[in-house]
Structures are given as structure tokens and as C-alpha cells.
Amino acid sequence: MRKKIAPLAAAIGAALAAAGTMVVAQRLAVRQPTEDVGSASVRTRAGLQPNENLLFNGWGVTPAGTHVPLAGDMPLKMVVSPDGKTLAAVTSGYNNHGLTLIDVATKRVTQFLPLARAWNGLAWSRDGRRIFVSGGNSGLLHRFQYADGKATAEESVAPAPVENAPVRRNRRRNRNPGSNAPAAAAAPTGLPTFLAGIAVHPETGKLYIANEGEHEVWVVNPETRQQEDVIPVGTHPHSVVFGADRRSLYVSNWGGRSVSVVDTQTSRRIRDIPAGIRPNDMALAPDGRLFVACAGDNTVRVIQTRTVEREQAEATPAAPPTEGTREIIATSLYPSSPEGSTSSGVAISPDAKTLYVANSDNNSVMVVDIADSRISRVEGFIPVGWYPTAVAVSPDNGTLFVANGKGLRSRPNHPPQEPRPRRLHKGVPFNHPGQLFQGSVSVIAARPAPEQIARYTEQVRRNSPYTPETLRRAPIASSSVVPDRVGAPCPIKYVLYIIKENRTYDQIFGDMTDKQRASRQRRPEPGRYARRCHLEPPSACPGLRILG
């Protein structure tokens, strides 16, 4: 009997050992939170798969706090109600545009109201009984009645019909923007209305809405929701905020590297203040400092709004030069980091001591001590979800809300997990990449202790494949034609880079036979022309020279 049991036991032991080896292998084929995503051990790991700690693009995600799932993705703006009980968020991505309400106390979604189109404009009325949402390229203004923690949608209205756009353009061309402000360029013919940021006048309650498509701000009656005035500003205005004087409106010009200042009493743009690249979201501190997120150059610009300085032709001892931007706060993970933090959301704690900045492409939120009005001090970074797009703080200063535009993890689009999968010419079902996004709001303690913020910062850096060293040397030695360190010899002399919209070679030529290609008699546009030259002999492509 013992002789029969021994082989059986050996077989069971071998099976268990094999199972254990498989578990270890599966565990090693994913990235652990404590591992540096750019390390050679992770990058060369056989069978490495994305998981809850690693995105498909090589960046890590280890979001702090707890998380509230949303019905849509890309929540571009979050605002706490005047009574401090409700957090409103507007989702504007690929899935389910709409307004979401979250109970600040319970941290749970209480309501979702779908919309056909929405953008980053979100504002509460002064009495907190109404919510306004901009409709992006629909040209609509959405309004909701709010009472007892519940919102009720009203019929959406176009403050100015789109067919009146030429009339508005003519009116803008003839308006003087101000004695010291540059003349406003007319919007290109055919640009549609695109309603973006919304601000409520602190005295009159009127709405000031950025029309990004036509480089202007609309003044809208909150009762009738009809346009009363149009004010030309800079290129592609994104967000609008009233300054500390409660009269001047500050407009971030997404396409103009500036912030326009509008006198709302005269409806005139009085000056443009230079800012960083792609200025977008803004937040006003109680002392009058305006913090402007600039997505294109890793900065937040600080502007004082207590008084509006007039631009001086020449500076003198009696009339010093205008201040403009008083401070520039770097948002990058390292001082030498290239552009790419993509700062796209800012919020200030109610006690005015802390600034929070959503760094979308770093999957982090930067924490800044702004208690000293003379200088801001970066305390560190908090790891959050995939592509944070907005931030807000609870009235008691204790909770930080972070909107994760794309969710908490990535997953493949095949096999499909969403309804109505797509099928191309190969017949393989798959989900559109946009369907893979699942927006969420992270709930995090707003005041991490110094030790905790230090640990958070180290985690954010472990989640990033970029370090100062990678700007000089690749993490893995390579013998390919692309050198693995700066300054190493390379046989490549020239690079021909051809851009042709968001389409692939196979989409245009993949199913064509040689006879079909030869039948194309007319000269195509440059992008397709270059592809044709790749398929046919050089004699068929006069004027194209192959370099190398």
C-alpha cells in the first residue's frame, strides 16, 4: 500500500509545485505598486500585462483614497454647491455626457442627468437653486432647478441661434476692445458656436459664458437665458472667473497664451495679460490671487485681481512696469522634466492655505502651500487615477475630490465587454477605445501629513517612466540603430515624417490591388501621394526624393 501511495503523493506534490510556480509567474508578469515602471526589471519582464497598477501606455496608476464611479467619462469641471452639501460634476467625454450630483457627506452619487452635449461650463446660481451647464458645440445652455438635494432638468435653450453667427461677427469687428487692448481678430468664417466656461456675476447674477468657437464672451440673462451682449476676447476662450473687485472678468484664452480682462460695467476688454501655453482652468483665492493652469508648459500662473493695472507705454520711477503674472509655479515632477504634465484643473481650499493642481498626463495632483501671499511652496504630489481632469475641496477643508477622466485602469478592447461591439472588414468584434473609459471621482484626505505627502510623491515618481536620467540614457541597453544614450553615434541621417489625419495606411491602401492603385489617375493630396510613392516606382512620383 505504501508503494502505491508514494507515487500518488509525488504526483500531487509535483502538481502543487507547478501550480505554485504558475501563480508566481502570473504575479511576476504584472507590475507591483512598489516597482519603478521605468526600471529594467519591469520593462524586460516576460509576458508583462497591464493591471490595476500599470496602464497599457507604460505609466503606473496607484490612486490614493476611495473611488466613486461615474456614468460618463472625462468630468471636466466640479463645483461644490453654495450650501456645501452637494458636489456637481459635468462629464463630457465619449460616454454619457451629463450632470452628476454627489453627496459631500456620504461621498455617494445621488443623481445623474444625461445631456446630449456638455462641456466644462458649470456654475451654481447665487442662491444655489439653479445649476447651469454649457453645451459645447450644440450651442445650448442647460439649466436645472435644484431643491432638497435633487436637480430637475428644464428645456435646454440656445441663447443665440447659430444662424445669427455672421451678425455677431460683424458686431465684433466694429467694436473697440479698449484703448490699451489689441484689436480682436474676427473669428474665421464658418466657425460654430462652442459654449465653454461659465461665471455668475456676484452682483447681478447674469451669466458670462465663453464662446470658444468665436473668440468672445456672451452675457446671458439667467431668467430668459437669452443673449444680452457679446464681448470680444482672446483666441478660443476656455474659462471665466470674476476677480476680487467683483467687477472685472478674467478669461483664459486657450489658443492665445493670455488671460483677457473684461470690465463688465462697460462690456469692454481692457487688457490681455500674458500667460503660459494653453491656459485653461482658473481658481480665485480670497486675497485676490488668481491661479491659472497652463496645460502646455508645466506651469500655473498667478495674477493679482484686486485692482486692474493699466499697461504703461514706458516704465518710470513714478510709474513702474505693470506686474502681469506675479508668480510662475512649476508643476513638473522634476525641475528638468520636459513639457507634458498637462495641468488642467485647479482648486483652492476654503481656508485659502492650499492649492491643488490636476496634472492630467502625470496621473497626479500637485499640492501647493499658498498661505504666504508672497511666494507659493510646492509640498508634493498625490497619486490619483488615469488622467485627472478636475479638482474640488469640501467646505471643511478636509476632503479632496479628484475627477479621473479615464478611470482607474486600462483594459483591452477585445474581447468586447460593452454592448454593441464593432466589426471591421476582418469581422472581429471589438469595443471602440472610447468605450473603455470609466470616469470616477477619488475621495482623498485633503491635508496629508508631511511624511505621507513624501511617500505619495515617491509613488508618483515610481509611476512615471520619465526621470532626469532617461533624458540622457535609456533604462535598457540597446544595440539598435536608435542609440540608447545621448551623443552615441547613429547611422540615421534624415527622417521623413508624413502626417495624414488619424487614419492608417491599411485603411486607405490595405484592400487595394495593384490594378486599382494604377487606376488612380488624379494627383492625390500630399499625405496619400507619399503613400502612393511607397507602393509604386520613383518614376511615378515626380518631385519626391528619398533621403538617406
Image (cartoon, rainbow, N blue to C red):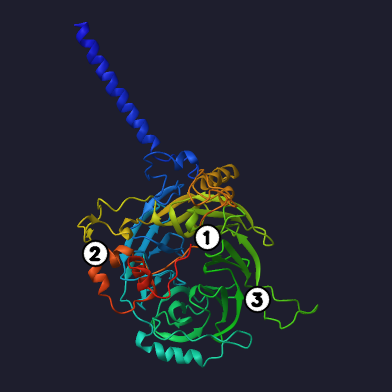
Q: Position of residue 381 (x, y in %)?
A: 55, 51
- Viewer-side label of 2, 1: 1
Tag 1: amino acid: Lys
At numbered mark 3, what does the secondary structure look like: helix, strand or loop? loop
**387 lies left or right of 323:** left
Q: Position of residue 139 (x, y in %)?
A: 37, 79
Frontmost residue, 521 versus 268: 521
How dense is the environment of label 2, judged by Cα within 10 Å: few (below 14), some, or many (20 and up)? few
Residue occupying the far front of the picture: 539
Q: On the image, numbered disc 1 is attached to which residue? A: 493
Tag 3: amino acid: Thr
Work out whether mark 2 precedes mark 3 in sequence or the reverse, and give the earlier one. 3
Asked if residue 247 can be seen in this view, the reply is no
Task: Give me the C-alpha separation between circle 2 and circle 1.
Answer: 33 Å
Write down the quadrant of residue 355 in the picture: bottom right
- Viewer-side label of 3, 1: 1
- Do the residues bearing badges 2 and 3 touch, measured as CB atoms within 8 Å? no
How dense is the environment of label 3, judged by Cα within 10 Å: few (below 14), some, or many (20 and up)? few
Q: On the image, numbered disc 2 is attached to which residue? A: 511
Q: On the image, numbered disc 3 is attached to which residue? A: 307
At numbered mark 1, what does the secondary structure look like: helix, strand or loop? loop
Tag 2: amino acid: Asp
Q: Position of residue 77 (x, y in %)?
A: 44, 64
